[in-house]
Image: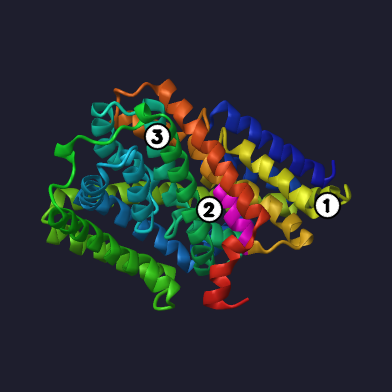
Amino acid sequence: MTPEFLGLIQLATLLVAIFLGYPIAFTLIILAIVFGYIGFGGLVFDLMVIQTFGFMQEEVLAAVPLFVFMGYILERAGIIERLFKAFQLIMGGVRGSLYLVVIITTTVFATATGIIGACITVIGLLAVPPMLKSKYNQRLSAGVITAGGCLGILIPPSVMLVLLGPVAGVSVIKLFAAALLPGLLLSVIFVGYAMLKSYLNPELGPPLPPEQRATSVVHALKELFLGIIPAAFLIFAALGSILMGLATPTEAAAMGAAGAVVLSLLYRRLDLQKVKESAYLTLQTSSLVLFLGVAANCYASVFGRLGTGTWITQSLLALNLPPFVMLVLLMIFIFLLGWPLEWPAIILIFLPMFLPLVHELGFDMVWFCIIVSMNLLTAFLSPPVAMAAYYLKGVAPELDLKDIYWGMLDFMWLQCLGLIIVMIFPQIALWLPEVLFGR
């Protein structure tokens, strides 16, 4: 049996194990040991040690627990709640105002943290009661909340981009700059869709009653000031310092986490119990991501040493398809992977298999990483995994799961529309990095 064929069996075994529901991280380690030992003997153990140390020495990965901690602190500090209520009071008289408020709030919050679960949970708690009370359409409401909450994984600072950078060998700072405009593009598409539907059918999103609007211009400006200034402070601490060259992603994550703690203390919403809860959840989330990263790195190193990745690349190039057609096929494959798998598994396991092909095709790696990230957003809105649905259902049990799924599917196709636009017009992603950092 040739090493390349052994690698194909390794890949097929992994896919079967995933679909059978086995824990991904442990499956990766076991398969790496078994097939590595068959392929090149005891050398596999030395290879796994080297890969583990190499992965964990990536300094930028220290930003992961810091960004996660910032997200959990903000969730408990009430900053996003204040922001949501400020926008609600100001825009309450607009048709479909709550859809608009949800998307704007989640977009602003996304620039301060990259935690999807926290964002959807808080927005669900804040938005679902007034939406149901005002007789907003349940499917459209669920779609707006889940899709808006997912923006946090793309709009920097993003945990996904922090993990994607080292895997693809791309600067995380450049990825942050490149992801900003595509993230805002998706936000504009979501707003346009929800507001157009509300305009064409007023029953989907009627204006809020007078008691839920600002009583005066002074009241509106006061709420806007108190709601926006804290968010703007955090955006500058976590994102502005990176793009302005004042801090590395890890340093900016530390500044953002410290800023979240300071604001929480100023709002008098922080106590020892909330800090302990945030620290525990941070440890849990970070351990999950980093352990999976180590396991996937070991698996990929065995797979690569067997030569299967090179063989797959050469076989695909032998098809002589136009580069853009090959790119579309890769995007379709990643889109399909997003239905049963979550984004860390796709980035850490499958993306390294595609990278040699992408290099051979001559695509810009920053742009490729951004379109992959936009593609992976669909993983949160596509059943059967669709974690966004379960986050929302957990805090809004009055919503039917079927309505949540149908609402998410509409926005999943909107995400695909945004992906197609960025694929056709790469400068949407590449313009800001070129302005800030040059070619």
Q: What amino acid is labelled 3 in the image?
A: Ser
Magenta region, residue range: 366-374
Residue 94 visible in the shown view: yes
Q: Amino acid at mark 2?
A: Val
> Which amino acid type is shown beneath numbered disc 1?
Pro
Residue shown at the point (70%, 51%) measured from the top left:
354
Q: Which mark is residue 322?
A: 1
Q: Quadrant of residue 270?
A: bottom left
Tell me the element at label 3: helix
Of residue 94 and residue 423, the one placed in the foreground of this image is 94
Q: Is residue 279 left or right of residue 345?
A: left
Picture quadrant where residue 22 is located? top right
368 in magenta: yes
Secondary structure at badge 2 equals helix
Left or right of residue 314, residue 331 in this image: left
Q: Which mark is residue 105?
A: none
- Identify the residue position indicated by label 3 in the image: 198
